[in-house]
Image (cartoon, rainbow, N blue to C red):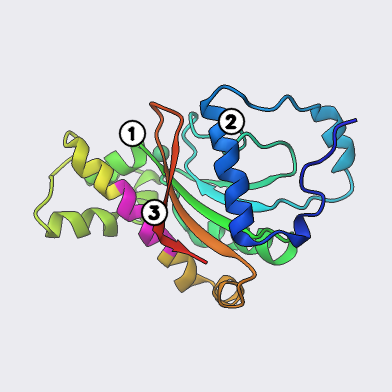
Amino acid sequence: MYKHPLLDRDKISPKEALDVLIEGNGRFTKNLSLHRDLLSIVNITKDKQHPFAAILGCSDSRTASEIIFDQGLGDIFSVRLAGNIASPFAIGSLEFSCKYLGSKLIVVLGHSGCGAVMAACDHYTGGHIGEILKHIEPAVDHHQALGHGQGSADKQFVSQVCQTNVELQIQAILDGSEILTQMLADKQIGIAAAVYDVGSGVVTFDHAKSLF
Ligand SMILES: [Zn+2]
């Protein structure tokens, strides 16, 4: 019988939740992901979900949080939008996870080679994609004001914008949510900044930009 690893997850702290994700990514990158009896977990979680972390990641098909952090059903409240943007709907989803489902940690997860970030670096404006990119523009503007690169062909520029975008989305969450700001002040949750490398499978957490 599969034992759900975090049935006591009410008792874990935000930093312990972070450790679970770091360990999971470590297993993933060593090709040691756990074999889970997913149908058993379906049964365990059928009446209630209690995800220990909420992850605001990109919709990119290479960045599925449950896989890269080696987690199972019921573990992660996954919010995915191109460019991992903290739109009002995304913030509402994070509030739902933390306030009503008991998640202890929010991760804002950018990634290398992000098409949304690259499009923002090129100031693309078409269709509804342009509405998404408006959320990334402040990170682009920040680096261009510093005299950095001018478009997506500059890989270092794209990487810098990706990292700054994560930082600014965390700020957008705090600016946009009294609920989450209060939970952070009360140490009920933490917010972590991270970037996933689509070439290696490694998630790098930026502890200096994380809030606990
Ligand atoms: Zn992306």
Q: Amino acid at mark 1?
A: Gly
Specify the label residue 113 is tagged with.
1
Front-lying residue, 47 or 132: 47
Q: Badge 1, how many Cα within 10 Å: few under 14, some, many 20+?
A: some
Q: Is mark 1 within 8 Å of ligand 1?
A: yes
x and y percentages locating residue 204 in the rendered image: 42, 43
Q: Residue at x 27, y 56 (%)?
A: 139
Q: For the N terminus, which image quadrant? A: top right
Instruction: Look at the numbered disc 2 and give the secondary structure of its residue.
Output: helix
Q: Quadrant of ligand 1?
A: top left
Q: Amino acid at mark 2?
A: Arg
> Which mark is first along the chain, 3 or 1?
1
Q: CA distance from mark 2 to mark 3?
A: 24 Å
Residue to which mark 2 is pinned? 27
Q: Which residues are magenta?
A: 162-170
x and y percentages locating residue 145 in the rendered image: 13, 60
Location of residue 186 by image quarter: bottom right
Residue 174 belongs to magenta span: no
Residue to which mark 3 is pinned? 166
x and y percentages locating residue 127 in the rendered image: 36, 44
Q: Residue at x 81, y 54 (%)?
A: 8
> Which mark is first along the chain, 1 or 2?
2
Q: CA distance from mark 1 to mark 3?
A: 14 Å
x and y percentages locating residue 182 in the rendered image: 58, 77
Q: Residue at x 16, y 37 (%)?
A: 154
Q: Nearer the viewer, mark 2 or mark 1?
A: 2
Front-lying residue, 110 or 133: 110
Location of residue 116 by image quarter: top left
